[in-house]
Amino acid sequence: MHAMPDALQDAAPELPHDFNLADYFLFARLREGRAGKVAIITDHERITYGECAERTARLASRLAVAGVGMEDRVLIALPDVPEFAYAFFAVLHAGAVVTMVNPELPDDDYAYYIDYTRARAIVIDAPLLARIAPALAASRHLRAVFVRGAASALALALPPELAGRVFVLADEIAAGDPACPAAPTSKDDVAVWLFTSGSTGKPKGAVHMHHDFAWNTERYAKQVLRMTEADITCGVPKLFFGYATGTNLMFPFAVGATAVLFPERSTPERLFDVIERHQPTMLTSVPTTIAKMLAADPEGRRRLGSLRVTLSAGEALPEELYTRWKQRYGVEILDGIGSAEMFHIYISNRFDDVTPGSLGKLVPGYQARIVGPDGAELPDGEVGTLHIRGDSAALCYWGAHEQSKQTLRGDWVVTGDQFRRDGEGRFWYAGRADDMLKVGGIWVSPQEVENVLLGHAAVLECVVLGYEEAGLTLPRAVVVVRAGVAAGDALASALIDHARSKLAHYKAPRRVEFASELPRSDRGKVLRRTLK
């Protein structure tokens, strides 16, 4: 095993065998005397830990009445509202299994998730009920539909198969037992499925145990992010995405901090408003939104002084974006990488050790190796596939045995990400294995070319891909220009010349195409396969 110099020591405690995540994240705060501390802030209300715990227990009791038992799956499709937190923790408190999906999916997609999870219950908004009622009625497993919103939802012309199975969420919480005890789960019981991005085929659920989430929280949230009860968190990605479930729900709750929730899309203007209104100390973001916030505030007039840190993940953060953000707002960015298979971040920059362009060093407790095509570990400086090991790894992909064997190999998770490690233990991202380009017999990292193009004043976003010409693979760039910039042949030539001035000529794009926006998944990742 490659020794990691200067790695933080793993100072996390051992977890007991009898263990429930709802207790770890929520009910333990009451025993610490934090019942009156504000746990959730919205534009309209402030909810304490005591209120959140009571509503969670009440809903857990109603899940049981509805026929949800231990290890049953419950599907949550809610926006970022307090009821998401109640539902999330209630399912865990009841010993059932949380599955979460984007509440803004196309209607037809819900049929897949309802069937794949075999959910016993689903928690949704009232407007969604009418749209997906046929998929709900078709399920052989669904016993209860909990609807957030007006009671008039029950007056909809629903399929007869749903008779007696649709309930108003607020009424159920009000009728529940505030003293409902936690189910007798262990740290090794299944707690949550985190869905993969589905870049190849339908998304699959990475099956995680209760202890996976606490294990990462004790290491990343507490040791790397140094979160305390004084923190106020705010998220660009929404809570259904494991990245945000961690940073804007689990992590703040683990330390008695406060989470800011808003259901609207995370546009730059909405984010600036939320930050100025609620004064969060931590912003969870992604490179795309960092770029859009910078573009929306070119004079740097917005004030982000409450923030002590911005987090970036989901895609590699270009050095140019890091530098502009830091210069404009004076707020540190900690870039890191995580995955559904590992729950959350396992490599990250540190407050006292940020290297722009690098993803930083291993989070305490995690181990990594860079592996070549022959399966042998590569020395520092060489690019290969990242294998990661840590006790937050998923058990399997549900219903996908062969895919599980390819990715989850004993203690090691094969990421498919191409990395190199330097002599100081920092990791540098080179792209996905299937995104790398072989130009003239030499491997080219798209990210390296993208970073150079982003340094041009005209470029807001870009993606570098390959195309075939006379049997050869050559680089091409798809570019989104900044507001007020004219796209055309002259700019395309200028961008190619800019890349050639900064890179070896074989790495520079031969063609530049322009787009109004880049296609993205519901988790914000660029859909390179679509562009290809």
Image: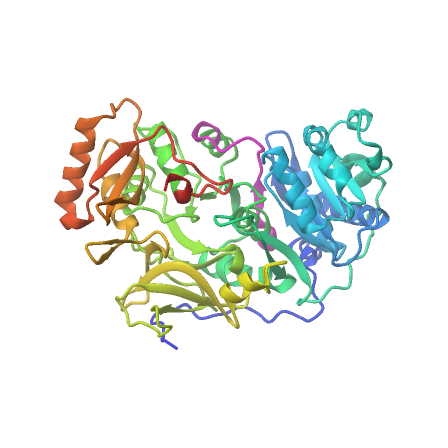
- In the image, taking residue 118 as reference, residue 181 lies left or right, namely right
Residue at the spot 58% in from the left edge and 37% down from the top edge: 261
| Image quarter in which the N terminus is found | bottom left
| Image quarter in which the C terminus is found | top left
Check the image and report above or below for 119 versus 397.
above
Check the image and report above or below for 373 versus 252.
below
Residue 435 coordinates in the image, percent (x, y):
35, 51
Residue 24 coordinates in the image, percent (x, y):
66, 59
Count all numbered tags in the image, as a single digit: 0
The colour scheme is: rainbow
Q: In which quarter of the image is residue 185?
A: bottom right
Q: Quadrant of residue 45?
A: top right
- In the image, taking residue 283 as reference, residue 398 lies left or right, namely right
Residue 336 coordinates in the image, percent (x, y):
41, 54
The outermost residue toward the front is 470
Looking at the image, can residue 34 be seen?
A: no
Residue 335 coordinates in the image, percent (x, y):
38, 51
Residue at the spot 69% in from the left edge and 47% down from the top edge: 115
Looking at the image, can residue 277 be seen?
A: yes
The outermost residue toward the bottom is 1
Query: Does 261 lie within the magenta span?
Result: yes
Query: Does 362 lie within the magenta span?
Result: no
Q: Which of 106 and 147 is in front in this view?
A: 106
Magenta-tinted stretch: 252-270
Check the image and report above or below for 493 versus 58.
above
